[in-house]
Amino acid sequence: MKDRESSQSRSGKPAGSPSRLGRVLEPAKMAAPVVGSARCLCLLGPGVRRTLRALPGLTQVRWSRYDANYKEPQLDKDYYLKPLEELTEEEKFERDLRTTQIFKAPPASKTSSLFEDPVISKFTNMMMKGGNKILARSLMIETLETLKRKQFKKYHEAKAEERETIECNPYTIFHQALQNCQPILGLVSILKGGRFYQVPAPLTDRRRQFLAMKWMIQECREKKPRRMLMPEKLSHELLEAFHNQGPVVKRKHDLHKMAEANRAFAHYRWW
Amino acid sequence: MMLRKVIRLISKSHKYDVLVYTSFCHTVFQFSRSFCQMLHSGCFLHVGTKASQSIAVSLDTQVLGEKCRTISRTQENDPVKTFNEACLMVREPALELLHYLRSTNFANPAIRYVIYGEKGTGKTLTLCHAVHFCAKQNWLIMHVPDAHCWVKNCRDLLQSTYNKERYDQPLKASTWLKNFKTSNERFLNQIKIQQKYIWNKRESIEEGRPLGEVVEQGLNRVKNASDAVGIVMKELKRQSSLGSFRLLVAVDSVNALWGRTTLKKEDKSLVAPEELTLVHNVKKMVTSDWHGGAIVVSLSQTGSLFKPRAAYLPQDLLGKEGFDDLDPFVPIQVYNYTPKEFESCIQYYLENRWLQHQKAHTEEGKKELLFLSNSNPWQLERLCAYL
């Protein structure tokens, strides 16, 4: 615990409000970090960020060992495969600049594979339990395969006219299903006059995507019969969501209805 | 149909995908016509309802004499469901094997052909191809889809009435008899048994009755199923030398016959493979002291018990005992895909719309698949399943 730097909050926002940076400020469990940090700051290397001394009682929970000088890595193969002649002056300058800069290490889950999909990776991570990425990934793969097989079966049983309407690509089904599950408005708890009101508020894109994935996973975990496997249930729910039916889309509609019902409190929101 | 039957047997035991595809070669192979003939002659009754909808078995391939380049993949549980067809890729090892089978001298003792190779290279399907070829040539097929099934996961072990020291497996024996019956219908009435067999105090079978009755008895009285299997094997071995029919003994995962089992007797001691009637009978079939046919056998590490994952050579998988029993044999090694075969496989998937990912259609996508799978057929199939 001594190594934890106590730092000042980035901006003076109140505790309850959503912070854009996603950093949650928690009251420090012990007063020691504030005192010990002076020595720690000297011991740490130059690359580590030295933030300012925190206000007493506030420490940063999520922090990075990387300095501000560290740049994000470039994982796009096309960037490097571009021949030298096609580069503009700016791009050449940027390339030369990159040779002098220091870069963060890319995470193990990011590859330069053509078949990588950030949405699927995020979904896999959300399905993961206890760090068992192998299991989560295999479940995801099996779900995609099951989706494909189900659609192929339908395709072969359908007549020639209907065949074009049947979507066999599991990736488009997955993306479309999640799109259909994303809510437009969410409800936020606001304290006014000693009472908490559920106020309709806009959601960021990230939050919407997160909610869609969360609902999907919750639905598949809780509402399935005992012996049914996750891929089977997930593929079934994804297909239903793709057609705008099913329990997850219903949950989204319920949220919209609640937001509509609480329209009167919309003025309680000040951002 | 025969192919589908065989594949269904194999895939039920192996539970991995088998898509069979005959693709673009340059001379006509007449597969579909022969299939229709077989269907009309009524020898393949076991055609599921789904298969009957889609008997468009598009096996019109073109073959340059011996230089076929067709590709075989198998599909989970039912080769016909996903693509509505059953296709095989013909590869070099299979061609070699078929050449030997075509030029067998039936006066000599049966030659043993052992198919071996690393995991996922296509041993089972090569065996499958040989079985199909022989079925087309009207041989009598004695096919054991997976010998590993017999040495593990068996709930019902009965002490054999014939020999006190051996153990019967009624359910497995009856499944085998059912499959044997559907694949060799026309022979069952032609072949007559040459000895009287007594089942119990009240039932017996006289000399001269058709073999079909033995099979019926085995299916009706499940307790006698293993003995029925023994009788069938003994009769066929004796009579194949006479020349009225040609016998093909095809055993997959033959290394199960000489390893260890996970079955236990009532006093919790382990059962050795020799103490199982089914295993004992099949071992007798695999010895080459009969003539009038051939023995094609393949090894398998995938379902094997107590063998390391990296083992694939006959010596490693069979053990000393098995190797000595099978020796001498003709070894046939199966390899990973050559670049041409890989290309052919990808083309097949693309034609059938199996590769749905947009990037998989590009050149870089193919290169990536080649790299990730290392041209291993099984690995490629697993990769393409979710792309």
Image: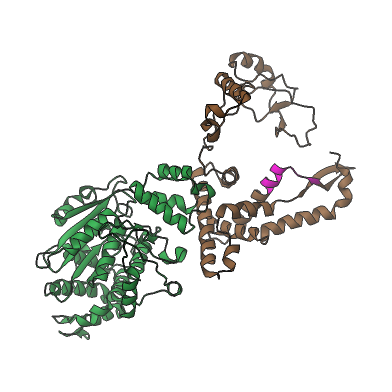
Chain colours: A brown, B green
- Using the image as rendered, state which of residue A266 and residue B119 is in the foreground: B119
Place of residue B337 in the rendered image (x, y in percent of width and height, measured from the top left): 34, 49
Say whether residue A60 is visible: yes
Q: Main secondary structure of the magenta part?
A: helix
Instruction: Give me the residue at 74% from left, 34% from top.
Output: A20
Instruction: Give me the residue at 37% from left, 44% from top.
Output: B374
Say whether residue B159 is visible: no
- Using the image as rendered, state which of residue B124 and residue B206 is in the foreground: B124
Measured along the vertical axis of the image, is residue A39 above or below residue B300? Answer: above
Left or right: residue A80 compared with residue A191: left
Total marks in image: 0
Instruction: Give me the residue at 39% from left, 69% from top.
Output: B57
Left or right: residue A188 compared with residue B357: right
- Using the image as rendered, state which of residue A130 and residue B137 is in the foreground: B137
Measured along the vertical axis of the image, is residue A170 above or below residue A54? Answer: below
Q: Quadrant of residue A170?
A: bottom right
Measured along the vertical axis of the image, is residue A255 above or below residue B233? Answer: above
Does the magenta run of residues contain A68? no
Single out the residue that lies furthest toward the left: B107
Quarter occupied by the N terminus of chain B: bottom left
**Magenta region:** A201-211
Instruction: Give me the residue at 55% from left, 45% from top.
Output: A129
Place of residue B173 in the rendered image (x, y in percent of width and height, measured from the top left): 29, 70
Place of residue A32 in the rendered image (x, y in percent of width and height, measured from the top left): 67, 21
Measured along the vertical axis of the image, is residue B241 above or below residue A164? Answer: below
Place of residue A256 in the rendered image (x, y in percent of width and height, measured from the top left): 78, 54
Left or right: residue B66 compared with residue B339: left
